[in-house]
Image (spheres, helix red, strand yellow):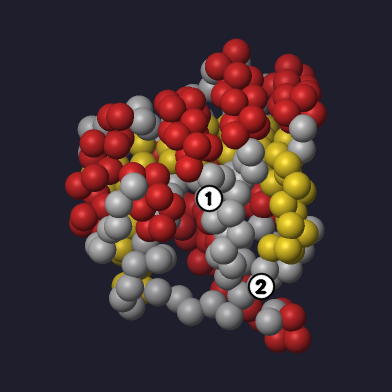
Amino acid sequence: MIYFLTIAASDNSGGAGIQQDIKIADRLNCWPLSAITGITVQNFNKIFTIEPVSPDLLKYQIENCINYFPINSIKIGAICSKENIMIIAECLKKFPHENIVIDPVIFSTSGAQFLDNESLTILKQELFPLAHLVTPNRHEFELLVGQSINSLDEAVKIAKNKCNEWNTAILLKGGHFEGDIIREALITHTSIYYFERVRDIFHYSHGTGCTLSSAIACYLGMGRTIYDSYLLASELLVDFYKNIQKDFNPLIS
């Protein structure tokens, strides 16, 4: 059995966050464990409120999972407070793990803010060096590096340095760059890989970042390389969202 731990916020609409992570892990025959960082009230269009859990409660959840289960991989999503960033870092420093994927959720698609500038600094200093992979989209990467980015090639040049500074591999997701072709890049300490695929237009696309990062973490937990984990996760993402369109209810859009 592959044990997958997701540390992220709850999404009551079921389309992102902990709920989506669990669906993806189950789809890949992994056993999903969870530590909830915060409670959100949202639908597919908007987040109405974000309530972080207490640091003590988050710590209790993480340590209970880590102490009892032989965890193969960990995904970290929306964290909701700087105090909880520190708690996660504290827990993972006590129990080091090689297959940690961080999806640095800073803003939701609708504009709700999960982390402020101080929290971003702590995230980069305390959590990124513990990760195997960080998966920012264009806007998240801009906030993390503190500058505007106009193209994937420009982002890759910056990511080469950040890969060493943050001591982690970086997956630059391409969905927020313009064009009919989505270009993405995986930057490791030794290599740069580029990927291209035709942009699919999904009427429903809630939780794509959660889906990709969770799938990558699950595949890493199975012993796949970071390169293969990305390819397999990307295929799963497209398949998942193509299939879900068939049952999508336009009344909720």
Mark number displayed over residue 13: none
User: Badge 1: few (under 14), some or many (20 or more) residues near its Cα, within 10 Å?
Assistant: many
- Residue identifier under label 2: 45
User: What residue is shown with label 1?
Assistant: 106
- Please, what secondary structure does the residue beneath circle 1 have? loop
Q: Residue 38 in the image: x percent, y percent? A: 73, 44
For residue 187, which quarter of the picture? top left
Q: Amino acid at mark 1?
A: Ile
The residue closer to the viewer here, 91 or 55, is 55
**Secondary element type, mark 2:** loop
Confirm whether residue 159 shows in the render.
yes
**Tally of numbered tags:** 2
Residue drawn at x 30%, y 29% as measured from the top left: 165
Residue found at the very far top of the displayed protein: 94
Query: Which amino acid type is shown beneath numbered disc 2?
Result: Asn
User: Residue 156: image x %, image y %?
Assistant: 24, 49
- The structure residue drawn at horizontal position 74% and vertical position 81%, both measured from the top left corner, is 252
Indicate the quadrant containing the N terminus: top left, top right, bottom left or bottom right.
top right
Q: 84 or 65: which is nearer to us?
A: 84
- Residue drawn at x 61%, y 75% is 204
Observer able to see residue 4:
no
| Residue 240 location (% of width, % of height) | 59, 65
User: In the visual, does 2 lie left or right of 14?
Assistant: left
Quadrant of the image containing the C terminus: bottom right
Marks 1 and 2, how far apart at CA: 17 Å
Q: Position of residue 41 (x, y in %)?
A: 77, 59
Q: Quadrant of residue 54?
A: top right
